[in-house]
Amino acid sequence: MLAQRLLITFVLLISFQGLKAQDWFPVGATWHYTERFFFSGDLEFLTISVEKDTVIQGIACKKMIKNKDLYCMDHERVEYVYESGDSVFLFVPDFNRFQLVYDLNMSSGDTLNFPILDNDMNGRELDTIQMRVNSTSFIIVNGRMLKQQHVDLEYLGDLYGYDGYLRQHIITEKIGSHDYFFYYSREFQGACDANLSAGLRCYSDSLLGLYETGIADSCNYIFRYFNTDEHNVASSKIDIYPRPSEGVFYVEGENLKNLSYRLFRGDGFILQRGRFENDHNLIDLRHFNTGIYFLEIEGEVHKLMKH
């Protein structure tokens, strides 16, 4: 009887390890990120999906495809990844090899160095980006406990003007960095005037289900800044005053009662949502920072300025 129990336990452990070996990248897994553009208030979305199993340099891995590339990250439209235990490896064309990008076994104080190629006046130079774990925690997603790492990403190279470069990320088991899955640039850039990721909106797969971070109203929400021009809403019967204001805005109009509204920051993050209770309402921004906000009422966008 004891031998039979041991055999059953062994089989269960082997089965668990087999499931865990495919835990990060089941085919069909999809990431949605907010896409921002310099010199524009427009917001779109980026997607990364696991397309299929494949083999690179004799290593069984997954093929990941994107709906578009980020100019500010200089990666490929197609990426290849594999996992081993709690570590994730990415194929880096610059070096023609897989490179460690995530290690969930790292704890506070641990560091991970990986090489990059810089562009400067003398051509391409080999440098390093270092990831340092500040702390670890856990998050519950659809009833499952996932480990998180809170890390700093620091450039260790010597390009002029990049001293003190430091970025902070949250890395979640199975999901990756909440900034962007491929969180470092293949060619380091201190500034970029094209498209870039503004954070993870959603992750979904057949094992974990759907996880939403809440930074956008939906996985594929699109926000057009130029649609907020006041001329586009001139025919509206909605009156909002005073504008600008120190924080209190009155919203009045015919048949406002029960209409839905959403209040956004300039980066598209939703601050409030609900339905108006009557035709005379108040939007209170006194506890928010000075700046420009957007009030969307049944698809019609109004600009609010708090001074």
Image (spheres, rainbow, N blue to C red):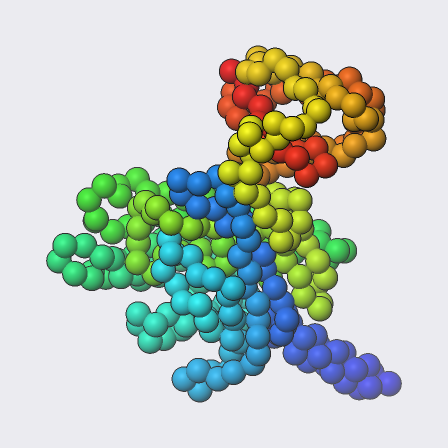
In percent of the image, x 51 and y 23: which residue is there?
A: 291
Q: Nearer the viewer, residue 94 or 107?
A: 94
Tell me if 7 is positioned left or right of 186 in this view: right
Instruction: For residue 1, say whether it is visible.
Output: yes
The picture places residue 124, in percent across and down from the top left corner, at: 20, 62
In percent of the image, x 52 and y 38: which residue is there?
A: 225
Q: How many marks?
A: 0
- Residue 22 location, quadrant: bottom right
- Residue 262 location, quadrant: top right
Q: Residue furthest left?
A: 122
Above or below: residue 35 compared with residue 74: above
Q: Nearer the viewer, residue 239 or 147?
A: 239
The picture places residue 243, in percent across and down from the top left corner, at: 57, 16
Instruction: For residue 24, say whether it is visible.
Output: no
In percent of the image, x 71 and y 79: which residue is there?
A: 15
Above or below: residue 281 compared with residue 205: above
Above or below: residue 111 compared with residue 96: above
- Residue 163 location, quadrant: top left
In percent of the image, x 26 and y 61: which residue is there?
A: 117
The picture places residue 46, in percent across and down from the top left corner, at: 53, 57
Q: Which residue lies furthest to the right in this view?
A: 1
Image quarter hosting the N terminus? bottom right
Tell me if 64 is positioned left or right of 191 in this view: right
Tell me if 7 is positioned left or right of 171 in this view: right
